[in-house]
Amino acid sequence: MNTIGERRRLLLFAVAGAIGFVVDAGVLYALAPWLGWYAARVLSFLAAASVTWLFNRRYTFAAARPPSLWREYLAYLGAMLGGAAVNYAIYALTLHLAHGPWAALLGVALGSLGGMAVNYLSARHLVFRPRGPR
């Protein structure tokens, strides 16, 4: 990461992740009483991924414009599956090891950190790659 542009993208990606974390935790705690901690986590992740996609396409990777908005959104969700697997595994492990009202929040935080590197590389190189000649 030797360019200012790449550092800026990484910082903006982290800001998107922080916003996504708030959405993720909020949706999780809102839905968990009805769906349980594990099913609610799937929906909360989808909500967070949608919010981070919007932020990332507008700010982090603004120069890379796709021919189709829906195609980009689906590609983004698909690309996030690797990070989602890491994220969910850490979340489930945290719930297994930690107990109490903050266990799920801790799991979301640790899972988010764990999946962030995978998600950044996927977003940068698979979804928001520069279009056209270089």
Image (spheres, grey):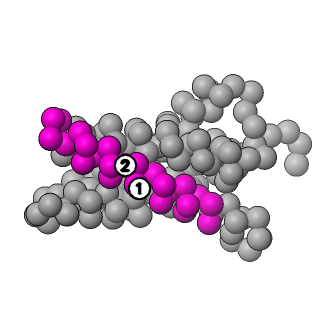
Q: Amino acid at mark 2?
A: Asp
Q: Can the viewer see residue 92 in this picture? A: yes
Residue 65 location (% of width, % of height): 75, 37
SS for dot 2: helix
Q: Which residues are magenta?
A: 11-35
Name the residue at 72% across, 33% down.
66
**Which residue matches tag 2?**
24
What main secondary structure does the magenta stretch of the protein show?
helix
Residue 5 location (% of width, % of height): 76, 64
Mark 1 and 2 residues: CB-CB less than 8 Å, in contact? yes
Residue 81 location (% of width, % of height): 43, 42
Quarter of the figure with residue 34: top left
Name the residue at 30% across, 39% down.
42
Name the residue at 24% across, 48% down.
29
Q: Amino acid at mark 1?
A: Phe
Q: Nearer the viewer, residue 72 or 101?
A: 101
**Which residue matches tag 1?**
21
Q: Can the viewer see residue 36 in this picture? A: no
Name the residue at 55% across, 62% down.
14
